[in-house]
Amino acid sequence: MHCPNCGQQVSQGSLYCRYCGKALQEEVVVRQGGNIVSTVFGVLISVIEFSFYVLMLTLRIMMSVLRSIF
Ligand SMILES: [Zn+2]
């Protein structure tokens, strides 16, 4: 299935889009009363994933620089 907000492909049955944090099953979210908290949580996960990506990219660049030196 695809996120109606950003159009990215998300796994079937996901409560939230892992790319933009949009709640995909709003009825469930409203019933649980955690819409804002869940959205914040989704954004937080995205930020963590992005930070991890940047970290890995930095490590890769550092490794290539070290290899060119030695
Ligand atoms: Zn999305």
Image (cartoon, rainbow, N blue to C red):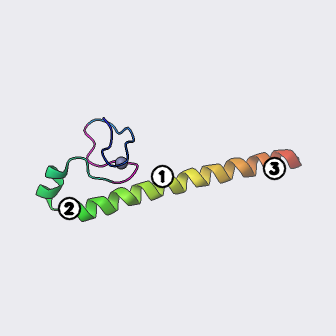
Q: Is residue 53 left or right of residue 36?
A: right
Q: Helix or strand or loop: what does disc 3 sit on?
A: helix
Q: Is residue 16 magenta?
A: yes
Return the mark for residue 70: none
Q: CB of residue at label 2: within 8 Å of ligand 1?
A: no
Q: Residues within 10 Å of mark 1 (few under 14, many from 20)?
A: some
Image x and y of residue 67, in percent: 82, 45
* Residue holding disc 2: 34
Residue visible at 53% across and 57% down in the picture: 51
Q: Nearer the viewer, mark 2 or mark 3?
A: 2
Q: Where does residue 18 sit, x and y in percent of width and height?
A: 37, 48
Secondary element at tag 1: helix
> In this figure, which residue is indicated by the disc labeled 1?
49
Real-space Cα distance between discs 2 and 3? 47 Å
Q: CA distance from mark 1 to mark 2?
A: 22 Å
In the figure, is residue 61 to the left or right of 56?
right
Between 54 and 7, the residue placed more toward the observer is 7
Q: Which amino acid type is shown beneath numbered disc 1?
A: Glu
First of labels 2, 3 by sequence position: 2
Q: Earlier in the sequence, mark 1 or mark 2?
A: 2
For discs 1 and 3, the disc positioned in front in the rendered view: 1
Residue that sits furthest to the right in the current view: 70
Q: Residue at x 40, y 60 (%)?
A: 44
Q: State the extent of the magenta-drawn residues as a range.
A: 13-21
Examine the residues drawn in magenta and state their main secondary structure: loop
Q: Is residue 46 magenta?
A: no
Residue ID at (88%, 49%): 69
In the figure, is residue 19 to the left or right of 29? right
- Image position of 35 (left or right of 49): left
**Which residue is label 3 attached to?**
66
Q: Dot 2 lies on which element? A: loop
